[in-house]
Amino acid sequence: MDSVKWREHRLDVGDHEMAWYESGGGALVLFLNGCYDSLLYRPLADLFSHKYRCVLYDQRGSGNSVLRHLDEESLHIDRLVADIESFRTHLGPARVSIIGHSWGATLGLLYAGRFPHRVERLALIGLGPFSDEMHAVYKANVLRSMHAADRSRWQEVNGAYQAAWRSGKGVPRVLDEANIRIWSPVMFYRLDHAEAFAAEYLRAGGYRRHAPFPAGHVRGEELERAARITADVLVMYGYQDYEPITQAYVLKEHMPHARISFLNECGHMVWADQPGLSFRALDAFLSATGCSLSESVR
């Protein structure tokens, strides 16, 4: 994580100062992180920093982008989408290339739907469920991937974890560690990658790296606005991701020009399980040579 030099900056976006980071040079690529803040996503951007100007930022209320008040107004989905537009304006390009992962893929899809003329390329990795049906598939996949003992233990630990999170008093380290030790193997295809992530997560501050979940309606909006997106689109999933990978084809129904890439022996964190394959597919896409991508990368 420390092998690539990251430069830290601040941007006043009205109700808070956004912390953002850049590394490398060349064409600008904006990375949108999932439910952990940008620090834990640097290994993804590190793959590209020798060729692109990679930019990450801490979404409002996470990492070093501290909000004075965490409530439904300050965390509304409209605010998070507006933050991207404020950030793009500050960075300068008329159009930006975006790589979004998990929740960040949802956020990127929403931004591209509302500001279609501002997005040049949009890569959606491990997009989460966007309907109640797909959420049920997600939940079933998560539970199925756990051993029976872990499944029972996780239900108990996760319930206590969520209660501690909502209390605002913080999550005890012992509870946070128990939760990530059970959860991380679900996210990765390889156990050693899961163990390395759990260790880094705890070293970096654990639950304090989480991005607060936004308020406001999210599900359904993605598909309603997707047809407006004119940017080049790549939808990427690991075959062994717990997220519903069939959503790739649902998205393609709404965006016929979208390309699909599946990576085998690969879970939710594609850059950890398959760094070479994921980089080559994404680099080809960003370099505008992605027309040669097959629908399945094995």
Image (tube, rainbow, N blue to C red):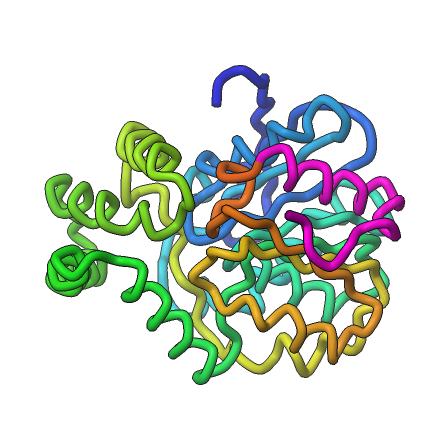
Q: Is residue 217 visible?
A: yes
Residue occupying image coordinates x 85% and y 40%: 287
Q: Is residue 16 visible?
A: no
Q: Magenta region's main secondary structure?
A: helix
Compared across the picture, whether 283 is left or right of 221 comes to right
- Foreground residue, 97 or 165? 97
Residue occupying image coordinates x 86% and y 49%: 292
Residue 124 pos. (x, y %): 64, 57
Residue 167 pos. (x, y %): 17, 60
Residue 148 pos. (x, y %): 16, 61
State the extent of the magenta-drawn residues as a range: 275-298
Compared across the picture, whether 12 is left or right of 39 comes to right
- Above or below, comparing residue 250 to residue 119 in the picture: below
Residue 228, by quadrant, is bottom right
- Foreground residue, 188 or 74? 188
Residue occupying image coordinates x 63% and y 75%: 222
Q: Is residue 289 magenta?
A: yes
Compared across the picture, whether 62 is left or right of 280 comes to left
Residue occupying image coordinates x 33% and y 63%: 142
- Foreground residue, 21 or 257? 257
Q: Is residue 199 magenta?
A: no
- Above or below, comparing residue 49 to residue 207 in the picture: above
Residue 227 pos. (x, y %): 78, 78
